Image: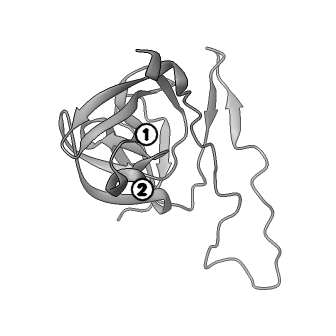
Amino acid sequence: TAFACIFQCFFCQRVQQSCNTSSASPDQSEEPATEMVKMTKSKTFQAYLPNCHRTYSCIHCRAHLANHDELISKSFQGSQGRAYLFNSVVNVGCGPAEERVLLTGLHAVADIYCENCKTTLGWKYEHAFESSQKYKEGKFIIELAHMIKDNGWE
């Protein structure tokens, strides 16, 4: 539709630049992680989230997807079961936006996929037509069927 052409998908690539660890001495200054993006053979940029944070990864290829600190809600439903709402994600590409009637009403959404293995993971909310749903705009849904927990979930 013409509506879908209006929306472009610009996913947030915000990544924590430093980690607070209990082993660091108080007088020791923390350096930001300088090499968080690496180039893979397929010419896809892949972001690596800091090891000191709990993260979510693609269940199919283990590419990092999100930092636990970016989790907004665990109370969402995807097409394949439960899903989580995130403020920002990494290593994710977006398809074109399209209008869909979801459980909470009409939304313009774009499917998101893992940049590494190309598996569809969920969607990005581009636009919410109901005022009560505006908080979802720019946020990401990832279905639990496509992600695993990494780093420090003991």
Residue at (45, 21) in percent of width and height: 4
First in sequence: mark 2 or mark 1? 1
Residue assigned mark 1: 127
From the top left corner, tell me how far across and down residue 77 is, in percent.
Answer: 20, 45
Residue at (48, 48) in percent of width and height: 66
The vertical placement of 13 against 99, above or below, is below
Mark 1 burial class by Cα count in 10 Å: few <14, some 14-19, many 20+: many
Whether residue 96 is visible to the viewer of this picture, yes or no, is no
Q: Nearer the viewer, residue 28 or 63?
A: 63
Label 1: element kind: strand
Q: Quadrant of residue 44?
A: top right
Q: Is residue 112 left or right of residue 148?
A: right
Q: Is residue 73 left or right of residue 34?
A: left
In which quadrant will I find the C terminus?
bottom left
Q: Nearer the viewer, residue 30 or 16?
A: 16
Q: Is residue 68 left or right of residue 133?
A: right
Residue at (79, 49) in percent of width and height: 34
Of the residues shown, which amino acid type is indicated by label 2?
Answer: Tyr
Label 2: element kind: helix
From the top left corner, tell me how far across and down residue 142 is, in percent.
Answer: 35, 41
